[in-house]
Image (cartoon, grey):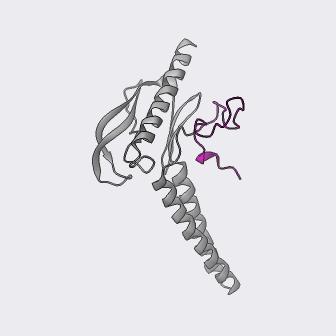
Amino acid sequence: MPLPFLTADGAFDAQEEDVPLAHDDRDRWRRPYRPGPWRVAGSALLLLLAAFMLLATMIIAFAGTWPGAAVCLAAALSVIGTAVRMLMTGVWVSRSGLRRVGFFGARSVAWNDITEIRTVQQPVRWLGLPRTVQGQALTAACRDGVELPALLTDHNPDFLSRSEAFDRAADTVEAWAEEYRTVHAAA
């Protein structure tokens, strides 16, 4: 079963120049980078926990305690949903704009509403925790003067200890912004 939220921009997966990729449609929302090892490891641990919870659900159901099995099943499904949502968080791009997906919600901004996207040095959160460290962040400013929260940081679960991957992802998002801001400005 293909998991489109795990695939990257296509630059990482291209094997031949002549063969178009199935996810090379610029109208689809896609992440311009791969999820980092911290995010994948956290989700894998949650899925392992959910497997044990589902096994416990089966044992409880065979014992004949249906309300307990229902509670255990609901808890396992919520852990699975949490793992999938953790994998989906990040920055997504398409021809229509930029989408910042968080754990509890998402915000989309059209390319023509973004005035600038740049990488800045600032205090950033370490692995999304309250502790801050000095690092790089990719920020975006909108036309109405509102600055979005940091889109990407070099200390988030996708890029911790992977500065080259952060630079490549930031450059990719900036390139998308340049390409589609000029397209929308000309239209």
Image label count: 0
Q: Which residue lies furthest to the bottom in this view?
A: 63
User: What main secondary structure does the magenta stretch of the protein show?
Assistant: loop
Relative to residue 129, is residue 178 depicted above or below? above
Pick whichever, 148 or 119, lies toward us.
119
Residue 8 on the magenta span = yes
Q: Where is residue 37 in the image (x, y as percent from the top left)?
A: 48, 54
For the point 72% across and 32% down, the residue is 19
Magenta residues, as a range? 1-30
Above or below 144: residue 108: below
Residue 68 image position (x, y, % from top left): 61, 80
On whether residue 178 falls in the magenta region, the answer is no
Image coords of residue 84 (percent x, y): 57, 55
65 lies left or right of 125: right
Q: Hey, which residue is sitting farthest top in the picture?
A: 186
Q: In this view, does 78 lie above or below 154?
A: below
Splitting the image into 4 quarters, where does residue 55 fall? bottom right
The residue drawn where x is 61% and y is 70% is 51
| Depth check, front residue: 160 or 95 | 160
Residue 58 drawn above or below residue 131: below
What quarter of the picture does the C terminus occupy?
Answer: top right
Taking the spot 70% from the left edge, 84% from the top edge, the residue there is 62
* Residue 11 placement (x, y as % from top left): 58, 35
Task: Out of 102 and 14, give the one closest to the viewer.
Answer: 14
